[in-house]
Structure formats: C-alpha cells, structure tokens
Image (cartoon, helix red, strand yellow):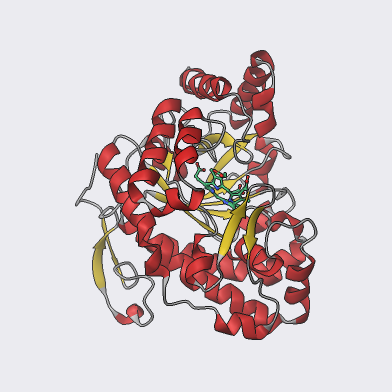
Amino acid sequence: MGTSASAFVESSDLAHPLQAGSRHLSRKCYIKEFMSAPNSRFIRACKALPVDRTPVWFMRQAGRYMSEYRAVRKQHSLIDICKKPELAAEVTITAAEALGVDAAIIFADLLLPLEVMGLPFRFEAAEGPVIEKPIREHADISRLRTDRASDLGYVSDAIRLVCKHFGDHLPLIGFCGAPFTLASYMVEGGGSRNYVHTKKMMYSSTAAWDELMQKLVAVTSEYAAEQVQAGADTIQIFDSWVGCLSVEDYRRYVVPHVTKLVQKLQATGVPVIYFGTDSATLLSTMKETGAEVIGLDWRIPLDEGWRQIHFRGAVQGNLDPVLLFAEWKELQSRAEHILALAAKRPGHIFNLGHGILPETPVENVKRLCQFVREHSAK
Ligand code: CP3
C-alpha cells in the first residue's frame, strides 16, 4: 500500500500537465507519486478492478443532517470552514469516521473558484448561493481572471491534513465543478429553474460561451491538479445541472470542454468521476469524455444506466436520497435491489443519486452504510 515506485509511466504530460508548453518536455513521472491510497477498494472500483465488497460513500456526507457538522456551523460560516484548513479537515474526517464509509470527500464548495476568477458570492440562508454581479456580456467574460487558481491553496492545505490523518487507510476524493454547472451559477447569479440566461448566451453568443468554458477549464483543471498533488486519490467533477440540456446541445456546447478537463485531470494520474443529475438521456455522451466513473442519479435503474455506457468502466450511485427518510425495511430492500442490479460486476461504487438532504436521519445513513458493507461482501 502507499506510494509505490514500481509503476511509472513515461509521459510528456504528467509532470506538469497543466502548464502550457509542457508538452515538449519528456519526463518520467510516477503516477502514484501523489495519491494517498491508490490500492484501496474504492480506487480499485473506480478503475473497474475486482474488489472484496462494494465500496460506499455519500455525496454531501459532511453536512447539516449531522449534529457534529451543525455544531461547527454554529461557530463558523460555510465559507470560513472551507477557508480554514484545520476546520475543513476536521469536518471531512469526522463525517467519514462517523459513517464508516470507504472514502472521504474534502469539505469545500463548488463555487470557490468563482471568487478567484473575480466573481464574489455569498450564501443566503433562504436562497442558497448568490453571485453579486452575474456575467451577461462578452466583456464580463473577458474580464474573468484565470491566473489565481493557486489562491485556492487552502483546499489543498486541508487535503494534506486529511491525508496525513488517514495515510493509506482511506482514500480521499477531491472535486471541482464542471464548466456548464459553474457557468450556470455565474450567468444566472444563483440557482435556476430554466437556465434562460445561460442557454441564451450559449445559443446567441457562442464565441463568448466558448471563452467562458475555456476559462473555467483552465482554472478548475489547475485547482483540481493541486488537489491531486496534495494527496487526493480521485477527482469528482460535479455537473449537477447539465441534465437541463438536450443531447444535441450537450454534445455541441459542453462535451468538448469537459473532455479537455477530464484529459487534464487524467494526466495527473488519478481516475476521474463525472457526475450529473437528470442525466439519463446523456449517459453515453457523458462517457465520451473518457471519465473512468460515471455517476448515475436515481431516475434510471442502475443496470440500464450501466448498459447505456456498454458496461465500460465504473458507475457510482444510485439510491434516491429521499429513501433515507423511509422506514428501514423499504430502504434496505431498495439498497439490496441496487446491489442486485450491479450483479457483482467489477466497478460499482454505492452512493446516492445526489447529495444527502439536510433533514435526513443520520441513523439511516449509518445503517445503510453498514448494510452495503455487509451485504455486498456475501
Ligand atoms: O459532499 C461533501 O460532503 C463535501 C462538501 C460539499 C459542499 N458542497 C459543502 C456544502 C460539496 C461536494 C459541495 C458541492 C456543491 N456545492 C455542489 C455540487 C453538488 C450538488 O449538490 O450537486 C453545488 C451545486 C454547490 C453549491 C451550493 N453550496 C449549493 C447549491 C448549496 C446549498 C445551499 C443551501 O443552503 O442548502 C451550498 C451550500 C453547502 N455546501 C452546504 C454544504 C455542506 C450546506 C450549507 C451549509 O452548511 O450552510
């Protein structure tokens, strides 16, 4: 376990995959140089390798449903927690240990890169995220900065603390937003129902849209690569709202950019998880980005989703988060059903179809985790 000097690859891209002009440099780079738990059950499953039982973790496993998190939130704002590595590490570790999951996910927020690009935002209790000056014109996009990703170093600092704590016992997931989902917040100014401003820009100012996507890929790829260098074992790309697009629009306006992001991240040596919701019609196109793991929400049976990507690579999902509010018998039978649909094929990571909701009974999350561990080992 731990770092291994045995597996190295020769590559022109690996050492500094994100710096322009690095392509001509031929370097040897150990792909496991940075990863903390490359041989863990979870990372093996990401690569669709056989494992002893199904790995399990939950999106938003550190959140308001958990009393330990609420206690920290009483003293600190969400952004404070993100920006103080000791606090972010504590919240990350506490949730992973309380649940007994097979991976931790670094505590941060999807929108942090907006600030370093020049778009300040805040969280309003009733509304969620609010971007102070949404971008609507080409000139707004031209002003966005791409040279300050390293100002997000507090996230990597938190990752280093978590990795020091877990060593190679538990893998750590880093994450970033996908360009479409981040753009939707930047353009709408917050959450949205119909994404009118975002789609309007996409359809009528395609050059501006492409520039925005490119800038987002530049910043998020550098940010996520720093997370890998700090010890993250995989990067999950959250494209939470991409399901609002038709397949044609997704393919034309989004896929080329996400594919670049996936390639840049893979050049760091880690497997990539690509997650979206409302994505049943997009799955085979999402797979064309080359991501090793595709996230499945709850709207499609697990085996059907997997079949759509021809059982190539791994899938993660896909229990409806609202089932955690049901009686244990129902919750258990639905979890059992998902495991049956996975049919012990290598490459299933048990998760919800989206994040844990704030009012979720924590005991059900713990019991579900234990059930998946025990039941999948049989
Ligand atoms: O999963 C984890 O445990 C890691 C932490 C994490 C947070 N945000 C912390 C957080 C992760 C992975 C995210 C990602 C994120 N942030 C996404 C993508 C995931 C998804 O749900 O699709 C999005 C869209 C955001 C933006 C964002 N941040 C929203 C829409 C909200 C909700 C606002 C609300 O009040 O519910 C947040 C706030 C947020 N980020 C919370 C947490 C734990 C809850 C609010 C809090 O503690 O005050």
Q: Where residue 122 appears, x then y in whole percent?
A: 58, 58
Picture coordinates of residue 86 (x, y %)? 33, 46
Q: With 24 as the anchor, is 291 left or right in this view?
A: right
Residue 303 vs 16, above or below: the answer is: above
The residue lying furthest to the front in this view is 75
Screen quadrant of the N terminus:
top left
Q: From the viewer's perspective, is 356 left or right of 149?
A: right
Left or right of 143 on screen, residue 93? left
Residue 52 seen: no
Residue drawn at 74 percent across, 76 percent down: 201
Residue 339 image position (x, y, % from top left):
59, 26
Query: Going by the picture, which residue comes out furthest to the top?
Result: 329
Task: Say if 374 sits above or below 38 in the image.
Answer: above
Total marks placed: 0
Residue 145 or residue 27, whichever sits in front: 145
Q: Is residue 195 above or below residue 65?
A: below
Residue closest to the eye, 105 or 120: 120
Q: Residue at x 64, y 26 (%)?
A: 324
Q: Residue at x 51, y 34 (%)?
A: 70
Please state if 199 lies on the left or on the right of 95 as rendered.
Answer: right
Residue 171 in which image quadrant = top left
Q: Quadrant of residue 221?
A: bottom left
- Please tell me in which quadrant of the rendered image residue 266 appears: bottom left
x%, y% of residue 145?
49, 78
Residue sticking out furthest to the left: 5
Which residue is found at the position 68% from the left and 69% from the top?
187
- Residue 202 makes an appearance in the image: yes
